[in-house]
Amino acid sequence: MKIKIFFLSVFLNGSKYKIYMNKTSQLVDILEFFNHERQLIIIEQNGKIQNKLNNKPQYFKDKDKIEIITIVGGG
């Protein structure tokens, strides 16, 4: 049985990461990996805001530039 391995080079918040995985991954997978709350963040992928994470799967690709912006409340 062959296991397909995916290799991606992704820029996340300005840092380059090399990711090895056994299936294609969605942006929400990165959020879970880095322990981010989906309700408290905004994701920018390649210069575009991704605001439909719950409606439609958003996958990331090799050399994507992803910015995770955390929303902070206060007074």
Image (cartoon, grey):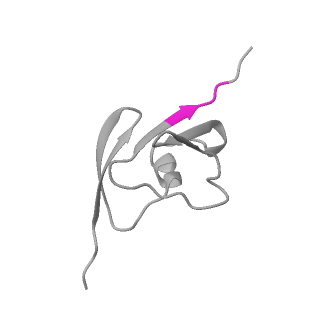
The residue shown at (53%, 53%) is 28
Residue 17: percent from left, percent from top: 30, 43
The residue shown at (45%, 48%) is 33
Q: Quadrant of the C terminus?
A: top right
Which residue is outermost to the front? 47
Q: Relative to residue 21, is residue 70 depicted above or below? A: above
Residue 3: percent from left, percent from top: 27, 76
Question: 3 or 15, which is in the foreground?
Answer: 15
Which residue is outermost to the left? 2
Query: Quick check: 2 left or right of 40?
Result: left
Q: Relative to residue 63, is residue 24 depicted above or below? A: below
Residues in magenta, as a range: 68-72
Residue 66: percent from left, percent from top: 44, 41
Q: Please identify the dominant SS of the magenta region.
A: strand
Q: For residue 1, which quarter of the picture?
A: bottom left
Query: Quick check: 69 left or right of 9?
Result: right
Residue 35 part of the magenta segment: no
Question: 69 or 31, which is in the foreground?
Answer: 69
Q: Relative to residue 18, is residue 6 depicted above or below? A: below
